[in-house]
Image (cartoon, helix red, strand yellow):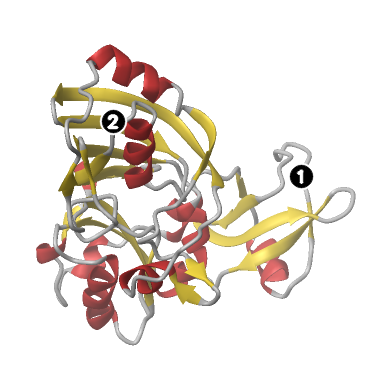
Amino acid sequence: MPSGLLNVLKPAGLTSRDVVNRVQRMARPAKAGHAGTLDPLATGVLVVCVGTATRLVEYVQRLPKRYLGEFLLGRRSPTDDTDGDVAELPDPPVPDRAALASAAARLVGRIMQRPPAFSALKVGGRRAYDLARRGLPVELAPREVVVYRLEIVAYDYPRLVLDIECSGGTYVRALGRDLAESLKTAAVMSALERMAIGHFRAAEAVALDRLDAATWRSHLQPLRRAVAALPQIEISAAEAARLRNGQAIRAAADWPAADEMAACCNGDLAAIVAPRGPGLLAPKLVLPAE
């Protein structure tokens, strides 16, 4: 059964689940899942994991992400984007580019971010957006995210375009909201393009309408690509067999010291391993031979 990763160029108007469902129909009976939600108005990179690759979703989600986000200042909506009911503020301040750049700089680094009420996070077992749509109060605790870069690409009030590099779990809508609020105004996200998830880039992504039952397999990328951020070690077939049987292997003297490593055999990912005692590596996650 084919397994691997699809770097799909998501079009606007579809949910991430819509994209996965299309891939799922092509790949049956293999499972499919995505590694990082994009809102319906957003476009760009959506990594879809197929078959065994679904076990590696969390490793793709950990990769840093890059976005181009467009915002309209002086406006707010309950969803923090233009998918909600947008209301213009009466006589809002019009910040200059220098003030915006200064506010953006204050959001770079490790920050505590309050997720939007209209999000897929769960509150008491329910999706926050389900509660928000019913008009119920949604209290989401701030959580730590990392913003590596936040730069102004274009500004012609009310339109502001930002180039953003951030950790997984960062809400771009909330970045625009918080930047604007720090300048005593508001903002809604009007467009979003995810340019990259780690080494999965928009320039190399395949358009969804180019995938069909005859072509999708040719676009699959190997499992090893999901864990490219981990230190890589090459192991023998005998060591791969030990790991797949749940047994530890001896660490070679020249292997890196890390909390997790990707163990590959003949170029294919065999397992994720972690230290267990002096000089030993134990399987944390094992994958069948490709």
Which residue reaches farthest right? 278
Instruction: Residue 119: give x, y in percent of width and height.
Output: 38, 61
The quarter of the displayed image where residue 78 is located: bottom left
Instruction: Residue 43: give x, y in percent of width and height.
Output: 19, 52
Q: Which mark is residue 252?
A: 1
Which residue reaches farthest front? 90
Label 1 residue SS: loop
What residue is rendered at 30% in x and 85% in y?
Answer: 28
The quarter of the displayed image where residue 73 is located: top left
Q: Is residue 267 visible?
A: no
219, above or below 227, in the image: below
Disc 1 packing (10 Å; few <14; some 14–19; many ≥20)? few
Residue placed most toward the observer, 255 or 61:
61
What residue is rendered at 38% in x and 22% in y?
Answer: 103
Callout 2, which amino acid? Asp
Q: Are marks 2 and 1 in contact (CB under 8 Å)?
A: no
261, above or below 104, in the image: below
In the image, is 170 to the left or to the right of 46? right
Residue placed most toward the observer, 92 or 82:
92
Label 2 residue SS: strand
Q: Is residue 181 visible?
A: yes
Instruction: Residue 129: give x, y in percent of width and height.
Output: 36, 68
Sooner in the amino-acid sequence: mark 2 or mark 1: 2
What residue is rendered at 21% in x and 76% in y?
Answer: 22
Callout 1, which amino acid? Ala
In the image, is 214 to the left or to the right of 103? left
217, above or below 184, in the image: below
Separation of residues labelled 2 and 1 (CA atoms): 42 Å
Residue under circle 2?
163
Instruction: Residue 274: give x, y in percent of width and height.
Output: 73, 54
Q: Which mark is residue 283?
A: none
